Structures are given as C-alpha cells and as structure tokens.
Image (tube, grey):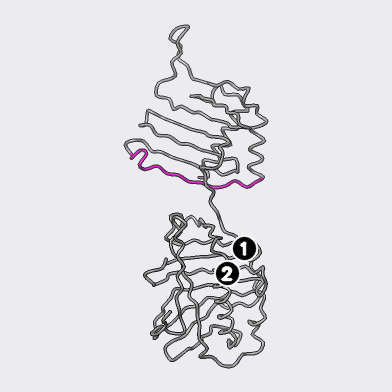
Amino acid sequence: MDQKGISPLVIVVVVVAAVIAGVGTYAVYRRVGTGGGDNNVAGNGVVGAASLDFTVNSVYNLAIMSGSTRMRARNIGTGNMDLRVDERNSPHPQMSRNTSIILSGSQHKMWKIDDNDENYNNDNWIDVSNYFENEWSVYSQALQEYKTYLESWNGSGNYTYEHSEWDHLLFYGIVVNPTLDNEVFTPTIVPNYENLENFVVYRISNASVGLMSDTITIKIDGTIIGEHIPPLWMGGEENKITKAEKLAENEFQEFRNLVIGANVFDLENQYQYPEIVDDNIVVTHPGAPTYDIKFTIDGKTKDIFWQTTENLPENLLTIIQKVVEFRDRL
C-alpha cells in the first residue's frame, strides 16, 4: 500500500465485519514510528507489567485527531492475555463514535459493540470470534507499540510521545499493574428470546380501556420480558413498550420450585366472575379485565383464565403475586 502523505505516527486500520448482519465497521488506531521521547526511564514498570490501564489521544498540529482510546490488559505477554479497548467520541466520519472490543486469549473469542448497533444503549455485545485471530494480532501489536512509547514516561501524571513538533500522542490515566476485575472482560449478551422456551406467560387484557394489554413472559433461563401495549387512543400496537432483565439464578430457581410445587396441572382451566343467565349459559362480567397465565413444564402446557382473584386457589394466587412483583421491576 502506498503510504505517502500518511503520517508515520497514525495509520487507521478499518476492519469491516460485512458478513455479520448489523455489525458494521470498527477501527483501531495503530501507532507506528520511532521518534520522540527521552531514553527509557528506569523503574516506571511498564516494560515488565502484567497488567496495564491507560487512555490515549492522537494529536496532529495541536488538534485532537481521535477520540479517547482506553486500553486495559491483563496477563500481558501470555497466550491468556485479556484485552479491552474502548474508543469514545471519535471525530472520524467513517467510524462509529463509540466502539468497544474485548479479546480473550484464553477463550480465543472476541466481542464488540458500537453505536451503529441497534442495541448499543443496552450494552448488548456481539460475538465476532471469527475475526479473533486477525484482531488478536492487530491489537497485541498495538499494545506492544504503546508500551514502547511509554518506556520514556517518568512514572507519574500524563505523558506526551512526540513524533515531531506537531505530531504526538497524549497518554493519561496511566496505571501500571492495576487489578482488573473479570467484569471488565466479560461481555453482556442479551439472549435471543425467540430461541428460548417460555416457562410462564402472564397476560392482562382490558377491552373497556381500548384493548390495553400487559404480558409478562418468564423464559426457562430466568429472563423476564415485559410487553405493554397501550390503549388504542394512545397508539396501541404502534407504541408498544418492551423491557427485559434476567433474574438471579437462585431467585429463578425459587420461583420455579414455587410453580412446580403448586401442581398447576391439577387446577381448573377457568376461574370466572360469572353472571348466571340460566342453567346453561354463563356470561362473564362485562367490562372487567381478563387475565390468563400459561405454564409450560416438560413439554406440557396449562392455560388458566380468570376475571377476579376472589375464587383463586392460594397456590395460584401466590404465583400470580410473584409474577406481578417481577412485572413491577420492569
């Protein structure tokens, strides 16, 4: 590649993840060049560090040419190195303004998230491990280059690596051998709800307020999904709101045991608030909201319908109260 006219200090490498729908592009600034800085400052600890945490900006002609790039790494120099890079507020028009990646040497896996992704604000990481080998090489080399530049850091405060009078890197927030928790290198993956089996589905419908409905679905992994469809006069389906969170494992197991212990398959299918017209016809109370709850256990399903809790068995009522408690969290 012809590099004439490109500063030897900053080469932008853009990797396009075109085969993964919705992934888009991401970038890493690779700093190359040998100029600037004093001789190695003995004792700053960077060269032999097992872990590092620092942030860097690229500056050209007194103008910041990149967003802040924070790099955190542990087990440096080993095949089990974990590396996280967070790029924020990039001014480059062809890049996402916010991008994060995690590389796990022990797992040979890679995850990313950027603000081109629909779920960026939900911190939903995407597994792009098919790019691991190439990106492991790229980012490992970038980290090594940064360490080389930091050899001249005096061990405290900020540091500027100068390539020329107008070309330099600004390092700050430098910490040598920090304790980096597992959370730093653990992505949050929102599960594909469509592929998870339902455990309990609780639904409220109210025709008297224009077909408003609330649905609480609890998946077999303990994920709670709440869906609210407002009345028709408030937009109905078009203004549907969906939220989700995952129960702690012990909390979900407690709820699961509650449902299993209730012997729901022995319960009635309907508990209505009836209005008796004659011996053969039962009309449900007009205008009252309707409720139903559906259980799926070991491939068997049980759907129970009611209009009032007045005649509900205590074990069913306890389950409903717990589901409503989950709903209120959302």
Disc 2 residue type? Trp
Q: Few, some or many C-alpha atoms within 10 Å of disc 2 (few <14, some 14-19, many ≥20)?
A: many
User: Which residue appears at 59% of the width and 69% of the height?
Assistant: 83
- Residue 5 left/right relative to 330: left
Location of mark 1 (residue): 108
- Which residue is situated farthest in the left direction here? 233
- Which residue is situated farthest in the front direction here? 1
Nearer the observer, 296 or 144: 144
Disc 1 residue type? His
Query: Are the two marked residues, 2 and 1, in contact with CB atoms closer than 8 angstroms?
Result: yes
Q: Position of residue 328 (x, y in %)?
A: 51, 42
The magenta segment is 234-249
Quadrant of the frame with the N terminus: bottom left
Location of mark 2 (residue): 136
- Which residue is situated farthest in the bottom direction here? 39
User: Which residue appears at 63% of the width and 22% of the height?
Assistant: 266
Q: Considering only vertical position in the picture, is 158 above or below 210?
A: below
Q: Position of residue 268 (x, y in %)?
A: 58, 20
Q: Considering only vertical position in the picture, is 245 above or below 129?
A: above
